[in-house]
Image (cartoon, rainbow, N blue to C red):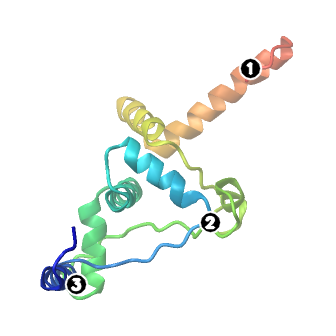
Amino acid sequence: MAVPKANQRAVNKYVKANYDRINVTMPKGEKEVIQGCAAAQGESVNGFIVRAVRERMERDSGSVAATLGVVQQEAGMAPAGRVVCRVPAADTAGSPQAAAETSAGAGVVSLPPDTLEAAERAAKRTGESVKAFVVRAVAAQEKRDENSFKLGINPA
């Protein structure tokens, strides 16, 4: 059924007044993957991408509100009291691992959200930072793996 032109103009006017647009470019084939993931979550592609970006901002800065506060403040829309948001280097190397190995991304490791949440819970229990917990956990696992190799067992 065709939508009357007046209705479409009204919708376009509302969208222009209430939303910002961002054009996202990605390698061929990723669009279909994102569409599939969004459908599996029962979301639109737009909703899925917005949620993913917000989750990443929250993970990187501690809260979406803090990150949005930085953007609003820099645009002259928020009160003083700067909140810092860490922005990782852009992935121009082709893969997350390659990006992590570049000088701009050195030391960056991407963890699935559930793994990061588990690390945050464990770090909170021990009273240490997530970074300190992960460093300690990796060192402990390295020792366990070293012992396994000495016994002729590949732990992987």
- CA distance for labels 3 and 1: 56 Å
Q: Which residue is mark 3?
A: 16
Disc with the residue nearer the chain's start (3 vs 2): 3
Q: Residue at x 42, y 35 (%)?
A: 123
Residue lying furthest bottom in this view?
Answer: 76
Is 10 situated above or below 142? below
Asked if the residue under mark 2 is in contact with the one under mark 1, i.e. CB atoms within 8 Å, the reply is no
The label shown at residue 93 is none
Which residue was labeled with disc 2?
A: 27
Q: Secondary structure at mark 2?
A: loop
For image coordinates 28% across by 79% down, the residue present is 20
Name the residue nearer the viewer: 128 or 113.
113
In which image quadrant can residue 137 be found? top right
Disc 2 marks a residue whose amino acid type is: Pro
Residue occupying the point 41% across, 56% down: 56
- The residue nearer to you, when weighing 24 against 153, is 24
Task: Point out the frontmost of discs 3 and 1.
Answer: 3
Give the mark nearest the N terminus, 3 or 1: 3
Residue corresponding to mark 1: 155
What's the residue type where badge 3 is placed? Lys
Dividing the picture into quadrants, the one containing residue 14 is: bottom left
Q: Residue 22 is drawn in which quadrant?
A: bottom left
In screen coordinates, is 121 left or right of 75? Answer: right
Q: Position of residue 90 (x, y in %)?
A: 58, 70
Furthest residue in direction top, as rendered: 151
Which amino acid does the dot numbered 1 rest on?
Answer: Pro
Q: Position of residue 135 (x, y in %)?
A: 58, 40
Asked whether, in this view, residue 71 is left or right of residue 149, the answer is left
